[in-house]
């Protein structure tokens, strides 16, 4: 072996002084670059099959008539009653069941967070996780058996000469759906806002107190500004949850309350005027737009809130 060849071999060999330790085989470098993508590939594939393809199908059918020809008639019909009324009711329902449970959830979460009982905090966290996912037929049956027209509580109240219907409350109406939705919206808000409450550092309150600030001034200038992005983000999450919910409202009212998800279900079940079968896809497209705007706003406020949760 010549001196030049020997020198080249030594300087390229790993573990030898003077060797180029940065020389890595091409296939290893390629594997390192592809590793993150390969790890997330199953999730992306699952998301595309479960969410991407249905969205593409909804967009396609929203602009086609029953014969398969391109048309904008479905979208135009969606902009008129009764379909427009369904959108309005769904937005109002989502707004009420996001703001009211949002405020109540923050108060409940703060009360539990400041409690000295660790057992109570764990119980509330566990119950919130269960109740936030409790809906549909089971939840509907529970409310019907409790405050329905022949529910247990309703019967008890009649002995006290109190009639819920005469007081203006009907479980099977729009505001009955509002009451039922709050059952799982409040626990969901507790779960969402608890990490933000944990981000309120005790040192901030101590510093404000040392500077002579009252509790009200602390909350006005420190606590509320820090929590507000998280609170708004939680309310947007509740809005999206209530706006897209279907099973609870459908089983409770049997479709008598005009909501966009219920209208979609009726149209897909064949309860449609001739030539308006694909209007349900147009309503779904409109719901996608509303939910997309909600998620974008949620991402923006969560990005701002994340500065205080580090």
Image (spheres, helix red, strand yellow):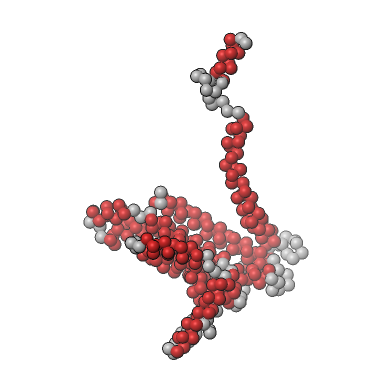
Is residue 151 depicted above or below 86 in this figure?
Answer: below
Q: Position of residue 165 (x, y in %)?
A: 49, 85
Q: Residue at x 34, y 53 (%)?
A: 201
Q: Nearer the viewer, residue 199 or 269?
A: 199
Which residue sits furthest top? 2
Q: Residue at x 54, y 79 (%)?
A: 144
- Looking at the picture, how far across and down is residue 248, in whole percent? 56, 71
Q: Furthest-right residue in view?
A: 67
Q: Is residue 259 visible?
A: no
Tell me the residue at 46%/65% (across/down). Answer: 127
Placement of the N terminus among the 4 image quadrants: top right
Quarter of the figure with residue 69: bottom right
Q: Which residue is pictured at 46% across the width and 54% down the height?
A: 302
Q: Horizontally, is 267 left or right of 36 in the view? A: right
Nearer to the camera, 306 or 159: 159
- In the figure, residue 141 lies in which quadrant? bottom right
- In the image, taking residue 141 as reference, residue 229 lies left or right, namely left
């Amino acid at each position: 072996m010549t001196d030049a060849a020997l020198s080249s071999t030594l300087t390229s060999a790993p573990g030898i002084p003077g060797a180029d330790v940065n020389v890595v085989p091409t296939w290893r470098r390629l594997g390192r670059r592809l590793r993150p993508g390969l790890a997330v590939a199953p999730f992306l594939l699952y998301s595309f099959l479960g969410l991407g393809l249905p969205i593409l199908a909804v967009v396609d059918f929203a602009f086609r008539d029953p014969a398969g020809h391109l048309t904008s008639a479905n979208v135009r019909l969606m902009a008129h009653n009764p379909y427009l009324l369904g959108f309005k009711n769904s937005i109002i329902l989502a707004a009420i069941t996001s703001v009211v449970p949002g405020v109540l959830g923050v108060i409940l979460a703060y009360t539990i967070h400041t409690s000295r009982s660790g057992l109570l905090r764990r119980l509330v966290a566990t119950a919130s996780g269960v109740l936030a996912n409790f809906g549909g037929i089971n939840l509907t049956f529970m409310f019907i058996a409790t405050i329905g027209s022949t529910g247990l509580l309703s019967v008890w109240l009649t002995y006290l000469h109190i009639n819920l219907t005469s007081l203006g409350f009907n479980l099977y109406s729009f505001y009955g759906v509002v009451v039922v939705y709050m059952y799982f919206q409040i626990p969901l808000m507790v779960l969402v806002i608890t990490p933000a409450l944990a981000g309120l550092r005790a040192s901030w309150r101590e510093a404000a107190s040392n500077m002579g600030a009252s509790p009200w001034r602390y909350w006005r200038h420190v606590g509320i500004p820090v929590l507000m992005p998280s609170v708004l983000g939680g309310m947007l999450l509740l809005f999206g949850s209530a706006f897209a919910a279907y099973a609870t409202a459908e089983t409770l009212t049997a479709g008598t309350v005009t909501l966009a998800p219920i209208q979609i279900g009726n149209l897909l079940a064949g309860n449609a005027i001739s030539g308006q079968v694909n209007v349900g896809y147009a309503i779904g497209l409109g719901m996608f737009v509303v939910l997309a705007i909600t998620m974008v706003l949620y991402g923006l406020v969560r990005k701002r809130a994340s500065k205080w949760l580090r």
